[in-house]
Image: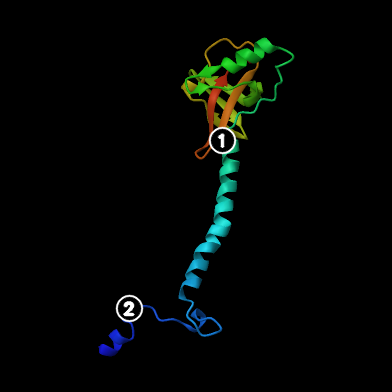
């Protein structure tokens, strides 16, 4: 028992790779390198992921109505659904008549090849001044959702 206590008990013993060339102990060096490596690659990678993810939520204004019809642009900028502001026409997408439908007082829209039920609170109830069906999708962690939907005339 005394041999076990004298040899250091539960303290890990140094291995050959824990010594420098001159024979001095370098026990802390390997554990520091284990921490430095994830930090060296992990922090820049995490920063890159955060920057790319933050771009998903940013509005983009292509300015398609700024010069041609500023009144319509201003109207788009004020559109709101029960889920909040729709941002502008630049954030929405026009939907063909074959890619949306209405039934039993609810709407469905086909986005990226799949039919998505439009939440009732996402429907814009004010009159559609441009006539075309518009949808404002949001890509998030839970998948594709709809922030705003403005039904068209379905001609």
Can residue 133 be seen? yes
Q: Quadrant of the C terminus?
A: top right
Number of marks drawn: 2
Can residue 155 be seen? no
| Quadrant of the image occupied by residue 22 | bottom right
Q: Residue furthest right?
A: 68
Tell me the SS state at disc 1: strand
Distance from the alpha carbon under mark 2 to that under mark 1? 53 Å
Q: In the depicted view, which residue is nearer to us: 23 or 17?
A: 23
Local packing at callout 1 (Cα closer than 10 Å; few below 14, some 14-19, many 20+) is few
- Which residue appears at 68% of the width and 12% of the height? 70
Q: Quadrant of the N terminus?
A: bottom left
Report x, y in % for residue 72.
66, 12
Left or right of residue 84, residue 75 in this image:
right
- Which residue appears at 57% of the width and 15% of the height? 78
Left or right of residue 99, residue 107 in this image:
left
Disc sitting over residue 139 in the figure: 1
Report x, y in % for residue 27.
46, 76
- Which residue appears at 46% of the width and 82% of the height? 15
Q: In the depicted view, which residue is nearer to us: 112 or 3?
A: 3
Q: In the depicted view, which residue is nearer to us: 108 or 137?
A: 137
User: According to the image, label 2 marks what residue?
Assistant: 10
Disc sitting over residue 86 in the figure: none
Q: Residue furthest left?
A: 1
48 up-or-down from 111: above or below: below
Local packing at callout 2 (Cα closer than 10 Å; few below 14, some 14-19, many 20+) is few
Report x, y in % for residue 113.
62, 35
**Which-is-in-front pick, marks 2 and 1?**
2
Left or right of residue 9, residue 31 in this image:
right
């Amino acid at each position: 028992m005394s041999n076990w206590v004298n040899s250091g008990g539960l303290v890990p013993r140094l291995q050959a790779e824990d010594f420098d060339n001159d024979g001095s102990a370098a026990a802390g060096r390997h554990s520091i390198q284990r921490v430095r490596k994830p930090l060296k690659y992990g922090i820049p990678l995490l920063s890159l992921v955060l920057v790319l993810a933050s771009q998903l939520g940013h509005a983009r204004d292509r300015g398609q109505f700024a010069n041609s019809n500023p009144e319509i642009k201003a109207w788009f900028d004020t559109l709101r659904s029960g889920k909040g502001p729709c941002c502008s026409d630049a954030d929405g997408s026009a939907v063909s008549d074959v890619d949306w439908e209405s039934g039993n007082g609810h709407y469905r829209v086909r986005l990226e090849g799949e039919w998505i039920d439009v939440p009732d609170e996402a429907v814009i109830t004010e009159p559609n001044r441009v006539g075309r069906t518009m949808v404002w999708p949001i890509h998030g962690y839970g998948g594709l959702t709809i922030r705003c939907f403005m039904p068209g005339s379905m001609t």
